[in-house]
Image: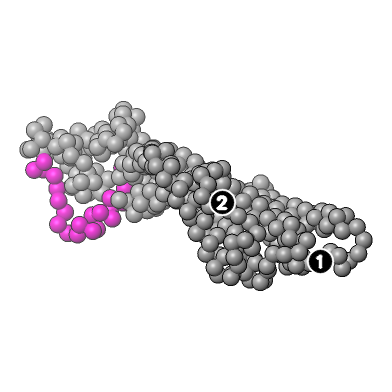
């Protein structure tokens, strides 16, 4: 696309057509999915209320056929609801990708519908009874099924977001964030990049400065001393003037300049804006990621029986609490999340895996924030 200027020249504007199309599709999916999901949910909730204590004998005709037709209608709205909910999730993903609240929002929405068989009867004062009880359970179960699928989608999305964040931070560290010291300095290839190495073992340490740097000869690190070749004028001037630094570590340490005009907090902030310290943080992140994965994995497999029991108790407590709040007896509950007195089964295992992945994703976001934002 081009535009004529008064002098006759033309300025070309580059257009991100793919991004524009995705943004347009994402907004449409968000609106269409929301409408379909809300419409489907509204009809399913209506049917759960309508068929509560409904007597098919009053309508006449073939009762099984009428119930089958009603069940088919509920299935239609179930598909509308489920597809709409997933399209809503896709629209949210396209529009809010990278937002820290995206996964949490989808997961909470999934929980809302997953536990619909517990809170809908309370709000609408639904009590089981009559020949249409199965239709009520089918309507409420459809809401729960949609919530389960959206929850699975949210966990998969969290896993993808986790992989992208880990890969980006591992490769680039905080290069996308605001850097002040050493921005224009290129990586130096003659020195190896030692994992969790000292400042003079990292790619941005320049050889001509390192040979005249008291930090290097004293075998210390700039971020510990709060002074270095990227931020302190005395170190840079000494390298430019060719000052002789003794090889003895103790003698070299005495030549480390300490700027008394800066407070410790100001020096710490100076480190946070340095490319060398960012490289050090990137190494920390590379160490923290597998450590977090191993820690969560050990907790899951080491305490799996106890965690499954706790998960079963949690689901049972949720169901019991909803029964108490809605004033329904155990026999009146539509959907049993678990059967009391039985061993944990597939449901508990599935919920525990989802919760473990969710906790891992949130843990990695906390690690990323601590290392690249707080710079701890």
Q: Residue at x 50, y 59 (%)?
A: 317
Binning the other alpha carbons within 10 Å of mark 1 as few (below 14), some (14 to 19) or many (20 upward) gives few
Q: Position of residue 310 (x, y in %)?
A: 44, 50
**Secondary structure at numbered mark 2:** loop
Q: Position of residue 222 (x, y in %)?
A: 22, 44
Q: Which residue is mark 1?
A: 55
Name of the residue lying farthest toward the left? 251
- Asked if residue 333 is among those painted magenta in the image, a careful observer would answer no
**Secondary structure at numbered mark 1:** loop
Q: Position of residue 326 (x, y in %)?
A: 59, 69
Picture quadrant of residue 293: top left
Q: In the shown orientation, is residue 171 left or right of residue 201?
A: right
Binning the other alpha carbons within 10 Å of mark 2 as few (below 14), some (14 to 19) or many (20 upward) gives few
Sequence-wise, the earlier of marks 2 and 1 is 1
Picture quadrant of residue 135: bottom right
Q: Residue at x 31, y 48 (%)?
A: 274
Q: Which residues are magenta?
A: 253-276
Q: In the shown orientation, is residue 96 left or right of residue 272?
A: right
Residue 11 visible in the current orientation = no
Which mark, residue 339? Answer: 2
Q: Residue at x 87, y 68 (%)?
A: 58
Q: Find out whether the residues at labels 2 and 1 contact each other: C-beta distance under 8 Å.
A: no
């Amino acid at each position: 696309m081009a535009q004529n200027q008064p002098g006759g020249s033309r300025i070309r504007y580059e257009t991100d057509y793919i991004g524009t199309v995705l943004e347009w599709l994402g907004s449409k999916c968000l609106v269409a999915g929301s409408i379909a999901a809300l419409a489907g949910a509204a009809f399913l909730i209506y049917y759960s209320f309508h068929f509560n204590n409904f007597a098919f004998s009053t309508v006449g005709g073939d009762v099984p056929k009428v119930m089958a037709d009603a069940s088919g209608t509920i299935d239609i709205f179930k598909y509308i609801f489920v597809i709409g909910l997933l399209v809503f999730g896709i629209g949210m993903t396209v529009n809010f990708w990278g937002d820290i609240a995206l996964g949490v929002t989808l997961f909470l929405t999934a929980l809302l519908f997953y536990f619909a068989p517990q809170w809908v009867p309370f709000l609408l004062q639904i009590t089981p009874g009559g020949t249409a009880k199965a239709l009520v359970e089918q309507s409420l179960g459809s809401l729960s099924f949609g919530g389960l699928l959206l929850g699975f989608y949210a966990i998969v999305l969290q896993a993808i977001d986790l992989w992208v964040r880990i890969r980006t931070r591992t490769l680039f560290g905080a290069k996308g964030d605001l850097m002040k010291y050493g921005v224009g300095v290129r990586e130096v290839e003659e020195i190896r990049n030692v994992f969790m190495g000292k400042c003079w073992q990292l790619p941005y340490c320049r050889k001509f400065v390192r040979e005249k740097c008291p930090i290097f000869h004293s075998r210390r690190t700039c971020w510990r001393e709060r002074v270095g070749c990227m931020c302190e004028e005395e170190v840079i001037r000494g390298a430019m003037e060719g000052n002789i630094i003794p090889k003895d570590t103790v003698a070299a340490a005495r030549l480390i300049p300490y700027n008394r005009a800066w407070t410790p907090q100001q020096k710490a902030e100076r480190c946070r804006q340095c490319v060398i310290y960012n490289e050090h943080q990137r190494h920390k992140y590379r160490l923290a990621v597998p450590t977090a994965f191993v820690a969560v994995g050990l907790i899951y497999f080491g305490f799996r029986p106890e965690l499954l029991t706790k998960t079963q108790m949690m689901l049972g407590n949720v169901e019991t609490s909803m029964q108490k709040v809605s004033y329904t007896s155990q026999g009146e509950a539509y959907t049993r999340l678990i059967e009391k007195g039985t061993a944990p089964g597939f449901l508990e295992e599935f919920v525990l895996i989802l919760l473990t992945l969710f906790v891992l994703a949130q843990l990695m976001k906390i690690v990323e924030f601590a290392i690249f934002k707080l710079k701890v």
